Amino acid sequence: MLAAHVRRFAYDDGAAPLLHDIRLEIVPGSLTAVLGASGSGKSMLAKVLAGWAVAGGHGRLQGTLELARDGRREHLDFRGSPDDPRLRLGAWGQHVAYVPQRAADLLTGAAATVGEELAFGLEQRGTPRAEMLAQVDSAARVMGLGGLLEREPGQLSGGEQRRTAIACAIVGRPAVVLLDEPTASLDAEGAASLSRLVGALRAAGTAVVVFTATADALARGASRWLLLEGGTAAVDGTPAEAEASAAFAASGVLREEAAVAAWRPGPVRAPEGPAPLAELDRVTFAYDGARATRGGTVNSGRPVLDEASLAVFPGEVVALTGPNGAGKSTSLRHLAGLLRPDRGQVRIDGRDILDDPAGRVAGTVGTLFQEPKDQLFERTALREVAFGLSGRSPGSLRLSRDEARRRASEALEAVGLPGRADTHPYELPVSEQRLLALATVLARQPRVLLLDEPTVGLDRFGLARLEAAVRRAAESGAAVVLSTHALAWARRQAHRGLVLTRGRFEAA
Amino acid sequence: MTRPEAGPAALASSGRTASGRLNPLTGLVLAGSGAVACLAWASWGTWAAVLAAALVVAAKARILRRVVAAASVVVVPFAVWALVIHGLFFPEGRTVLVVVGPARVTSEGLAYAGAIILRTASLVVVMLAFSLWVRVPTLRAALVRRGVPAQLGYVLASALGLAAAVGERLRRIREAQEARGLVVRKGPGGRILAARLQVVPLVLQLVDEAGERAAALEARGNALPGRRSSYVDEPDSQLQRVLRWTLACVCAVVVASVVVPAVAGVLAGAAR
């Protein structure tokens, strides 16, 4: 159905290849998993297969792409020269659909509702309206978006946006679906929907390829694993063969964690012991329906937080869980002083922060946002981490320039990015962007650490860095609050867990 | 799936059916006719009728408050200016009401100021009522169905949503900077002062996003040739079509009846 031979792919003629010597043959109804650590070339390979990296003459591909569909065979032979055949992305995309790692990149940004977003591709192909409505409803239902069709896409939570993007990809019934880190930030229901969707697609003859750093349940359902390392195929075989290989053991690919029964034992706290460092005290909050917000969900005027209370003590790691759109990010933004409660109090280190600007709260609280790119705005990784450490501005930590530089370098070292100090943040793979964003938080040595979906997209090495940072922070007496869908991981890292349901926290 | 699902029947009566039962082009023609009437006939009665009609329509569409708020931003400063200039200093004024130093308040000056304020208010309210009432996706669908290129429709929709998108992105960058110690003073002044730190990252993010979005749009068929179809319903009827064409023809006649004599006058003057 789709066959690719990537002899060499690079963005510039003289540059080292980003991909080389990869062969992939995808047959109808199959599930293939392309596994690899951060920077191994997974997303690049996905973009080459999807045509995004080849169309428009941006990248130089030497190799072949072949697509067989409806009895017709399209064979494109690329030699990396200006005379190469032109890949018509509009026609290619009809058969080979792709959901990028940052799912929001697939969305048009111009649709007023989720329904219009899903319908965009069908509109462009002139699908008759009755058929279009049926296809949109079917794609929405299978991704659990039935109740969100009238919602503005910009107001969806991270997980809901991913579901929307996946629905956009499948709505036109393509022959091949390429999913880059599809389970990232999906809740249990979303992951179950995705598994069912993949099953249904395969049953209908659609081939599915997942690109992931985690050998999770979805990847384990694949008939074939391709392990990438340094931009080329390190292992190609059945999951059992690949998993038994030395290359797999040495790679940064994560194995799905076994369920853990108990939370990590917490610090012993005397009854009259220290006061909480971070506290939500009967906080009620509803989004203004007219305001576009990410990470929070508008629910027809119903409060996202409804008298929610939470107290985190020094040295404690607390995990917040709950379905997509439950209000986890909203809770963290309250603790960071970025949102103000409609009712109730937010206290940091015993002090009500209602009248404190977020920049001042940041003296005590460090926040890792769900979408790392939202957090990166400097020219180099080092400058990024050093932002706000020195200088005379009101919220600056007012370190000397040398001290700020030293702190920033140490933070980069702590997340495993010392060699990336001079790289532009946007040139890093998404997982390294998350680690860089983590470094910006660690450099400030906050007493309260807020981590919103910190594990998403991280490979084994990145996850180990994150775990070490969380442990160090807790051991030094910081209060850590993290929101996550990775329950097994949360149980290993956190001392207790809270589920956010109907606007309130309950013990997990 | 535990969430309640909305089937096609349920949706047929909600957002997919756009702004009520009026076609966006009918709305456009009605607003255009109101504007033409205001410009063609210098009569208090016409201006007041157009203004009243626009306000009634806005009230029915439940956008009266937004229309009045937005119109006030334009009309109030203009009204103050007109009253100062024409109310106090109107050389043709004969009926003097009050004299304060060099300023003479005349009834003719007040009448003139009142007329241009009413005329401006009518025009502004009519156009704002239309732009706040119309649902951009429905308008886009209506235009594309009538042969406007689909890409132009996308540009129109994204341009109308651009301010909101840029505002949202600025907010996210500002929050990221606040989370690292940027202190933003309360109120719009503080935000504008802080915005200088967000301009460069904003531009970089928009450029980066535009690259990704271009590929995504193309892969989803934005550049394909051929006819488009539309997800949103375009409400229309024979009556609306007749009304649109009738009003458009009347407007053309009215404009011609004003423009042709004016141009003829200018040409005749030039010939003399």
Image (cartoon, grey):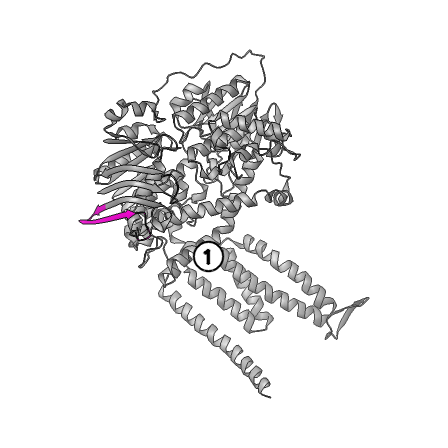
Magenta-drawn stretch contains A72: yes
On screen, residue A9 versus residue A435, left or right, reads left
Residue B216 versus residue A344: which sits nearer the camera? B216
Residue B35 in percent (x, y) is at 53, 67
Q: Could you say which quadrant of the image residue A487 lies in?
A: top left
Residue A193 in percent (x, y) is at 31, 34
Residue B6 shows in the view: no
- Around disc 1, counting alpha carbons within 10 Å, would you say few (fewer than 14), some (14 to 19), or many (20 or more)? many
Residue B205 in percent (x, y) is at 49, 44
Q: Is residue B269 above or below residue A416?
A: below
**Which residue is at the far bottom?**
B272
Quadrant containing the N terminus of chain B is top left
Residue A172 versus residue A71: which sits nearer the camera? A71
**Which residue is at the far front?**
A14
**Which residue is at the far right?**
B101
Which residue shows up at 48% across the image and 34% down it? A304
The number of numbered discs placed on residues in the rendered structure image is 1
Residue A55 shows in the view: yes
- Give the magenta-colored segment's residue range: A67-83
